[in-house]
Image (cartoon, rainbow, N blue to C red):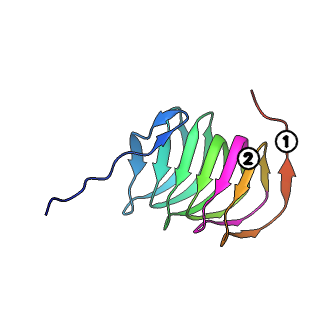
């Protein structure tokens, strides 16, 4: 049997080349340009004009401002996604959200208010 290697997630911004792994715990102010995946724990502030993927099992305690946010893990804090916010079935958001486009899968847990905004072109 051959072992399959995980293929990087490809986004509208390109493939994700930076991953904060499951064993990673980070605190502070996080800014980035290229697509980023967080699979571990993060606490603080996240600010980007790019793509952010929160994997299943990730725990984020932060206010997030990014172009596109995909949530498969758990976020405690407010989320502003200027282009799109997608919540996967394993996603949990405890905070207010602002976004131009919203997609919520069955099974999502969301506690907070939602405000639809004009898309940031």
Look at the image and say whether residue 18 sits in the magenta stretch. Answer: no
* Foreground pick, 23 / 102: 102
Q: Would you name the residue on which mark 2 appears?
A: 80
Q: Position of residue 40 (x, y in %)?
A: 45, 61
Q: Is residue 15 above or below residue 93?
A: above
- Residue at image location 50% in from the left, 38% down from the top: 35
Residue with the most extreme front position = 1
- Residue at image location 85% in from the left, 47% down from the top: 116
C-alpha gap between disc 1 and disc 2:
9 Å
- Horizontal side of 46 relative to 4 (left or right) equals right
- Horizontal side of 2 relative to 33 (left or right) equals left
**Magenta-drawn segment:** 80-96
Q: Residues within 10 Å of mark 1 (few under 14, many from 20)?
A: some
- Horizontal side of 33 relative to 108 (left or right) equals left
Are the residues at dot 1 and dot 2 in contact (C-beta closer than 8 Å)? yes
Q: Would you name the residue on which mark 1 appears?
A: 117
């Amino acid at each position: 049997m051959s072992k399959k290697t995980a293929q990087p997630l490809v986004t509208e911004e390109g493939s994700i080349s930076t991953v904060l792994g499951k064993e990673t715990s980070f605190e502070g102010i996080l800014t980035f340009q290229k697509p980023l995946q967080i699979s571990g724990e993060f606490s603080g502030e996240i600010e980007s004009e790019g793509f952010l993927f929160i994997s299943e099992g990730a725990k984020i305690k932060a206010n997030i401002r990014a172009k596109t946010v995909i949530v498969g893990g758990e976020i405690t804090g407010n989320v502003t996604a200027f282009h799109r916010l997608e919540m996967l079935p394993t996603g949990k958001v405890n905070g207010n959200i602002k976004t131009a486009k919203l997609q919520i899968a069955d099974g999502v847990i969301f506690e907070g208010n939602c405000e639809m905004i004009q898309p940031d072109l």
